Image (tube, rainbow, N blue to C red):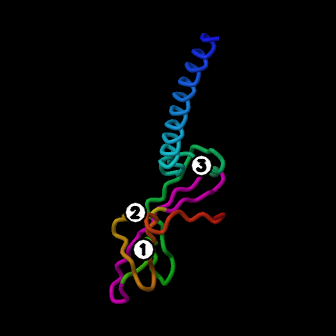
Amino acid sequence: MADHSEQIATLRDELATLRDEVASLHRDLRRAREHVDLTMRGQLRCRACGCRKIAHAMKVLDRADGSLREGMALYQPSWWSSKTRGELEAYACTRCGLVEWWVVDPKSLQPHDEFLRIIDGELAGPTDPYR
Ligand SMILES: [Zn+2]
């Protein structure tokens, strides 16, 4: 009888240890998932079809308003200057055509009344449409 309760105590301890380890692994897994890079730029793999041949357009031409050789950008801060901010580059899958846009110099982005607002996810929280 004493032998059984000793075994049960040992099993309880082992169970508690395993629970702690599982909780720790859950935390690690959650942290790892937050840092998974699923981009074509990062993985050189299309997330839609798995293709490994990715086209990289270092500059995307903006053909509007006669600006034949200008690079496409997010906005033009001032009417008086042709200087643009947020010049774009793109990665495109050579099989299915999925395109991923990137701003070449994201640190240059500043809020603009008309063209750009910056949403701070740290302050706003995650945008979960099912919440
Ligand atoms: Zn693809």
On the image, the x and y values in percent for residue 13 come to 53, 24
**Most extreme residue toward the bottom, as rendered?**
80
**Most extreme residue toward the front, as rendered?**
1
**Mark 3, secondary structure of its residue:** loop
Q: Quadrant of residue 104?
A: bottom left
Q: Which of the two marks, 1 or 3, is nearer to us in this view?
A: 3
Circle 3: residue type: Cys
Q: How crowded is mark 2: few (under 14 residues within 10 Å), some or many (20 or more)?
A: some
On the image, the x and y values in percent for residue 78 come to 35, 86
> For this view, does 20 lie left or right of residue 129?
left
Q: Quadrant of residue 100?
A: bottom right
Circle 2: residue type: Val
Task: Specify the segment rendered in magenta.
Answer: 78-101
**Residue at the (61%, 45%) spot, across then down:** 51
The answer to which of marks 1 and 3 sits earlier in the sequence is: 3
Q: Which mark is residue 108?
A: none
**Residue at the (47%, 48%) spot, across then down:** 35
Q: Quadrant of the N terminus?
A: top right
Residue wearing tag 2: 104
On the image, the x and y values in percent for residue 17 come to 51, 28
Decide if ligand 1 comes within 8 Å of the CB at mark 3.
Answer: yes
Tell me the CA gap for discs 3 and 2.
20 Å
Q: In which quarter of the image is residue 81?
A: bottom left
Residue wearing tag 1: 70
Q: As displayed, is residue 100 above or below residue 83?
A: above
**Residue at the (53%, 53%) spot, across then down:** 55
**Mark 2, secondary structure of its residue:** loop
Residue wearing tag 3: 46
